[in-house]
C-alpha cells in the first residue's frame, strides 16, 4: 500500500496497517536544524508531500519572511520578526483606516502568475499523499489587514465595511482553491486560528453567522474536484468542531491538549480524521521522552478506534528536543499497552 | 441616584459607549456610558463612587463572563471602549488626585515576543478594576521593567508571553525585578503559561484570564 493509499484509507475511516505520519516544522526548525529534520524523516518518513510549486511573488512584497527585522507580504501587511525562524506579528495594517478599502486590491497576481506546470508531474512521480497548502485564512487575513483589535470591534459592530472585506477575501480564497482544484493534488489545506487556550475568540453564534458559510464553500469546491479538505486551527475550538465536520472538513488539526481529548473522541471519532497532534506548548518542548510517549498513548486511546480517522502528526518547534519528536512517531507504532 | 450607577455599569458590561453607537443593537438610541457618567457627575455623585460602584462592577461583570466562557473578545473590547468613554469624564479627578487608583500595574509582553492582544485585554480589565495601568508594550527587556518598577514604588507587574520560545524570558525578568525589588508582586499569563511555571520561575501568581488578574491584584493590594 502506498502512502497515498494509506492516507486516503485513513480519511475514509477504513482499517489501515499503520497510522500515517506527518511532521510539521516551524520555520526556525527547518532553517537552523535541517540536518536533524532530514535524519528524522529518514527514520520516520512522512506519508505526505507538498506539490512542486511556489506561489508567484506579490507586487507589494519586500524583505524576507521569518528573518529578524521587517518584511512586507503580498497583501502589503508589514511583519515584525523579533527572532529569525519565529513567525512575527503584523504591525502595520494596510486597512488600518477603512478609507483605504475602496482602493485596496488583494494580490491576485500571486494566483494569476503562479506556474502550475510542475504540479501534476510532481503528483504523478510520488507515492505520497500530495497536500497543497493554500493561502486561505480569512479571519487571520482580516486581522493582518486591519489589526486584531480593530477586527474584533468591526465584528462587534457588524459594519458594512467588514462584510465588504469578508466578501473580498472570500473571492480571493475561492480563486485560490479553484486553482488547486484544476490540479492533481490529493488534498488542500487551509487554516484560521479560532481558539484561545480555553474558548473561542469570538462567540460560536458570530462564527456560524459569518465564517461557517465561507468554510462550507471551500469544502464544497474542494470536494467537487475530488480533493480532501484539511483544516488547521489553534486553540480550544471544541465549540465549533461539530460545525467544521458539518461543512465538510475531512481532516482537522487542532490543539488537542487545550481540549478534552477523550470527549472529542467520543463525539467525533468516525466523523472526522484527527490530523494530530501532540501538545506543542509544554510536552514537546519541555517534557521528558516518557511524558511524550504517555501523551501519544493518551491520544491513541482516545482517537484511534482501529479504523482510520487519525494521523500521527506533530509540530517540531525551534527548540524542541530531537528525541521528543522521535518518541512521538516511535510510540505511534508500538503496541498500545492496556495500562499506562 | 443608585439607578444611574447601575445603568452606567450595565452600559459598560454591554459595551454601550454612547447614544450614537449602534452597539449593542438592542440599546440603540439609548444613552451610553459617556452620557450617563457626565450626568452622574452633574448630579453631584462623587467620582470615586462612580468608579467603584459603576465602572468597576461593569468591567467585573464582563470579565467574569469572559472567564466563564460566556463572553468573548469582541465583548470585552466593546466594554473597554465604554469604560474609556466614562473614564474620560473621571480623568481630571484622577489627575488631580481626588480619585486615587487602587494601585499601579505595570504590564508588558516579554523580550522577543511581539504579541499584544492578551496583554491589552488584561490591561483594559485591570484599568476597569480601578488600577492605573502602565503598558510598556511588546518585546520589553528586563531593564525597562526594572525602570518602571523603580519609578512606581509599590507597583505590581504583569508579564505576558504567547510563545514557548519567549516564555523562558519571563524567568530572567522575574529574577531581575525581584533581585532589586523583592517585594514586587508579579503575575504572569499567556497561552503556554500555567501555575506550575509561575511557581518554577518565582512569579507570585498566574492567571488564565483578565479577571483573574484583577482578583489577584485586589487581594494582594
Image (tube, grey):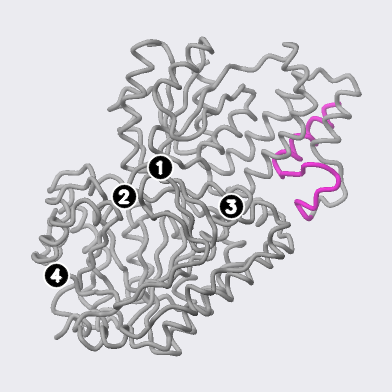
Instruction: Look at discs 2 and 4 and give the one toward the viewer.
Output: 2
Q: CA distance from mark 2 to mark 1?
A: 16 Å
Q: Are marks 2 and 4 in contact (CB under 8 Å)?
A: no
* Callouts 2 and 4 in the same chain: yes
Along the horizontal axis of the image, is A211 left or right of A299? right
Q: Which residue is tagged 3?
A: A93
Q: Which residue is tagged 1?
A: B162
Q: Which residue is tagged 4?
A: A45
- Within-10-Å neighbours for mark 2: few <14, some 14–19, many 20+: many
Does the magenta segment cover residue B21?
Answer: yes
Question: Residue A160's image quarter?
Answer: bottom right
- Within-10-Å neighbours for mark 1: few <14, some 14–19, many 20+: many
Q: Residue at x 35, y 80 (%)?
A: A187
Does dot 1 land on a helix, a strand or a loop? loop
Q: Are marks 2 and 1 in contact (CB under 8 Å)?
A: no
- N-terminal of the two: label 2 or label 4? 4
Does dot 3 land on a helix, a strand or a loop? loop
**Residue B14, placed above or below residue B200:** below
Q: Which residue is tagged 2?
A: A85
**Residue A14, placed above or below residue A159:** below
Residue stretch rendered in magenta on the structure: B1-25
Amino acid at each position: 500500500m502506498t502512502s497515498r493509499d494509506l492516507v486516503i484509507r485513513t480519511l475514509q475511516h477504513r482499517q489501515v496497517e499503520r497510522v500515517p505520519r506527518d511532521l510539521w516544522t516551524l520555520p526556525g526548525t527547518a532553517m537552523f536544524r535541517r540536518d536533524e529534520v532530514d535524519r528524522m524523516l529518514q527514520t520516520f518518513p512522512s506519508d505526505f508531500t507538498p506539490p512542486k510549486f511556489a506561489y508567484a511573488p506579490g507586487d507589494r512584497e519586500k524583505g524576507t519572511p521569518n528573518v529578524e527585522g521587517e518584511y512586507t507580504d503580498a497583501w502589503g501587511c508589514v511583519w515584525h520578526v523579533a527572532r529569525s525562524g519565529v513567525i512575527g506579528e503584523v504591525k502595520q495594517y494596510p486597512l488600518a483606516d477603512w478609507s483605504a478599502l475602496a482602493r485596496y486590491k488583494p494580490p491576485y497576481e500571486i494566483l494569476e502568475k503562479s506556474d502550475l506546470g510542475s504540479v501534476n508531474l510532481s503528483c504523478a512521480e510520488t507515492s505520497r499523499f500530495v497536500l497543497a497548502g493554500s493561502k486561505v485564512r480569512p479571519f487571520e487575513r482580516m486581522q493582518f489587514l486591519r489589526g486584531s483589535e480593530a477586527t474584533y470591534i468591526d465584528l462587534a459592530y457588524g459594519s458594512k465595511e467588514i462584510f465588504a472585506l469578508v466578501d473580498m477575501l472570500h473571492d480571493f480564497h475561492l480563486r485560490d482553491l479553484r486553482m488547486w482544484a484544476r490540479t492533481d493534488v490529493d488534498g488542500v489545506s487551509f487554516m484560521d486560528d479560532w481558539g484561545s487556550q480555553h474558548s473561542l475568540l469570538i462567540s460560536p453564534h458570530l462564527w456560524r453567522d459569518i465564517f461557517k458559510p465561507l468554510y462550507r464553500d471551500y469544502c464544497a469546491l474542494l470536494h467537487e474536484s475530488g480533493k480532501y479538505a484539511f483544516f488547521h486551527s489553534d486553540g480550544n475550538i471544541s465549540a465549533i468542531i461539530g460545525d467544521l465536520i458539518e461543512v465538510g472538513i475531512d481532516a482537522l488539526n487542532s490543539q488537542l491538549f487545550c481540549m478534552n481529548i477523550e470527549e472529542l473522541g467520543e463525539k467525533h471519532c468516525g466523523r472526522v480524521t484527527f490530523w494530530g497532534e501532540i501538545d506543542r506548548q509544554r510536552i514537546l518542548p519541555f517534557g521528558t521522552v516518557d511524558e511524550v510517549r504517555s501523551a501519544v498513548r493518551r491520544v491513541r486511546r482516545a482517537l484511534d478506534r482501529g479504523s482510520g480517522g487519525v494521523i500521527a502528526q506533530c509540530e517540531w518547534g525551534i527548540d524542541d528536543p530531537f528525541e521528543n519528536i522521535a518518541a512521538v512517531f516511535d510510540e505511534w507504532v508500538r503496541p498500545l499497552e492496556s495500562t499506562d | 441616584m443608585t439607578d444611574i450607577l447601575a445603568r452606567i455599569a450595565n452600559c459598560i458590561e454591554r459595551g454601550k459607549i454612547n447614544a450614537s453607537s449602534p452597539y449593542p443593537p438592542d440599546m440603540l438610541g439609548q444613552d451610553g456610558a459617556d452620557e450617563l457618567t457626565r450626568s452622574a457627575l452633574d448630579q453631584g455623585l462623587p467620582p470615586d463612587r462612580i468608579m467603584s460602584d459603576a465602572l468597576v462592577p461593569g468591567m467585573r461583570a464582563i470579565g467574569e463572563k469572559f472567564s466563564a466562557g460566556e463572553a468573548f473578545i469582541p465583548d470585552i473590547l466593546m466594554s473597554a471602549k465604554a469604560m474609556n468613554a466614562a473614564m474620560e469624564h473621571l480623568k481630571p479627578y484622577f489627575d488631580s488626585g481626588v480619585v486615587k487608583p487602587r494601585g499601579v500595574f505595570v504590564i508588558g509582553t516579554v523580550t522577543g515576543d511581539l504579541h499584544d492582544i492578551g496583554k491589552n485585554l488584561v490591561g483594559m480589565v485591570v484599568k476597569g478594576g480601578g488600577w492605573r495601568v502602565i503598558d510598556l508594550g511588546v518585546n520589553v527587556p528586563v531593564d525597562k521593567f526594572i525602570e518602571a518598577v523603580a519609578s512606581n514604588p509599590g507597583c505590581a507587574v504583569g508579564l505576558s508571553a504567547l510563545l514557548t520560545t519567549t516564555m523562558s524570558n519571563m524567568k530572567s525578568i522575574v529574577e531581575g525585578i525581584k533581585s532589586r525589588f523583592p517585594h514586587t508582586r508579579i503575575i504572569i499569563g499567556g497561552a503556554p503559561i500555567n501555575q506550575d511555571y509561575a511557581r518554577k520561575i518565582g512569579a507570585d501568581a498566574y492567571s488564565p484570564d483578565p479577571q483573574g488578574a484583577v482578583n489577584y491584584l485586589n487581594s494582594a493590594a
